[in-house]
Image (cartoon, rainbow, N blue to C red):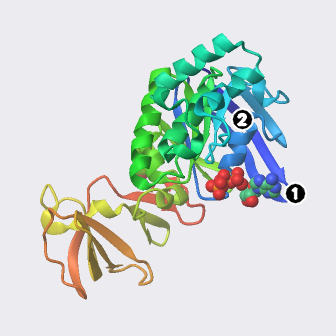
Amino acid sequence: MAVVEVRGITKHFDDVKAVDGVDLRSEEGEFLVLLGPSGCGKTTLLRMIAGLEPPTDGEVLIGGQVVNGLPPRVRQIAMVFQSYALYPHMTVFKNIAFPLKAEGLDAKAREDKVQWAAKLLDIDRLLHRKPRNLSGGERQRVALARALVREPSVFLLDEPLSNLDAKLRAAARDDLLEFQRRVGITAIYVTHDQVEAMGMGDRIAVMNQGKIHQLGTPAEVYDRPQDTFVATFLGSPPMNLLDHGDFLIGFRPEHFLPTVVAEPAGSGTPLVFHVNRVEFLGSERYVYGIVQGYPENTKVISMLPSTVAVPLAVDENHDFVVVPGKLRFFDRETGQRIEEQAL
Ligand code: ATP
């Protein structure tokens, strides 16, 4: 186990600022997620921590030691990629043993370690197979086992589940987390999938354009987004934002309800909602419209669980409220959150 820290880390590719002065520190044994849209610099940041990419500026520390300039193999890290990069002509056993052979371990020690990792990941019955005869989830576990035998202090994972179908992915997510907890190893996990990030991360670093916009627990980044980027990147559908002149007001679709179902009765911030369209999705309804008194081009969404069966006629006005305590405020120019007391 080790703490990973980056200080003022920067990477320029010619005129592209892939990573732009990032400070970040993991806790020991933490599952830390880097989340952001495609091209925001997640992979580049991870590769600099791994030692696969030299930073233009800044420091990388692992276990309190500056490791800039040290090659990947002495950094006590193991990296698992989206592609897994297993050797197709080798059996699972040989794939897992490969880094140990490179380190010069004798055959008996290699055998013991492979068996240990294979048991831990429940793939000991697959050791004689070739990767092409494995499912995606099994391949992922082989890649993890191969990373694990080197007894790293830190796991760096770059979208390792993105090749799996949705069902397998959910199961693999559980497996991976359970395994990380059991081994107690610090993990940094890159994804652009907010569901994965919210479900897996102890904390999430939300990135955009080479910078970290917010670092916090899933509940913090969801409920108290630092700025409009975080507010709208997280959540599906995203947070509603209305231009209030001096500032923007924000509220999540699930906190925007018909007044008649507001609890306690009469509570919340009243708004008149002109409903344009209702989408029935089984477990919930998405209600699309505009809010009276705000620009007509600002689409607003309410997400109602099916248990809220209030009829909502289209092309009519309805009394809605934002649930108490759930209005958020943002600076119109900078997009930064403003505390309510400061208004
Ligand atoms: P994705 O989710 O699509 O993998 P990412 O957030 O991991 O994206 P990076 O791969 O870190 O993003 O890329 C960040 C930026 O740096 C992008 O604009 C990318 O085009 C650029 N970039 C990355 N590697 C190189 C390179 N070797 N040479 C030039 N530009 C690069």
- Which residue is at 56% across, 27% downward? 186
Q: Is residue 308 above or below residue 57?
A: below
Compared across the picture, whether 117 is left or right of 152 comes to left
Residue 300 or residue 161, whichever sits in front: 161
Identify the mark at residue 14; answer none if there is no mark.
1
Count how many numbered circles sit on residues in the image: 2
Three-letter code for the amino acid on which mark 1 is drawn: Asp
Q: Would you call the spot at circle 1 few (<14 residues within 10 Å), some (14-19), or many (20 or more)?
A: few
Check the image and name the residue furthest to the bottom: 315
Under 8 Å from ligand 1: the CB of mark 1? Answer: yes
Ligand 1 rendered quadrant: bottom right
Mark 1 or mark 2: which comes first in sequence?
A: 1
Q: Position of residue 15 (x, y in %)?
A: 85, 59
Q: Quadrant of the N terminus?
A: top right
Q: Position of residue 85 (x, y in %)?
A: 67, 43
Disc 1, SS: loop
Residue 166 or residue 325, whichever sits in front: 166
The residues bearing labels 1 and 2 have C-alpha atoms spaced at a distance of: 20 Å
- Which residue is at 79% across, 47% downward? 11
Disc 2 marks which residue?
49
Compared across the picture, whether 89 is left or right of 294 comes to right
Q: Is residue 207 above or below residue 108?
A: below
Q: Would you call the spot at circle 2 few (<14 residues within 10 Å), some (14-19), or many (20 or more)?
A: many
- Which residue is at 78% across, 32% downward? 59
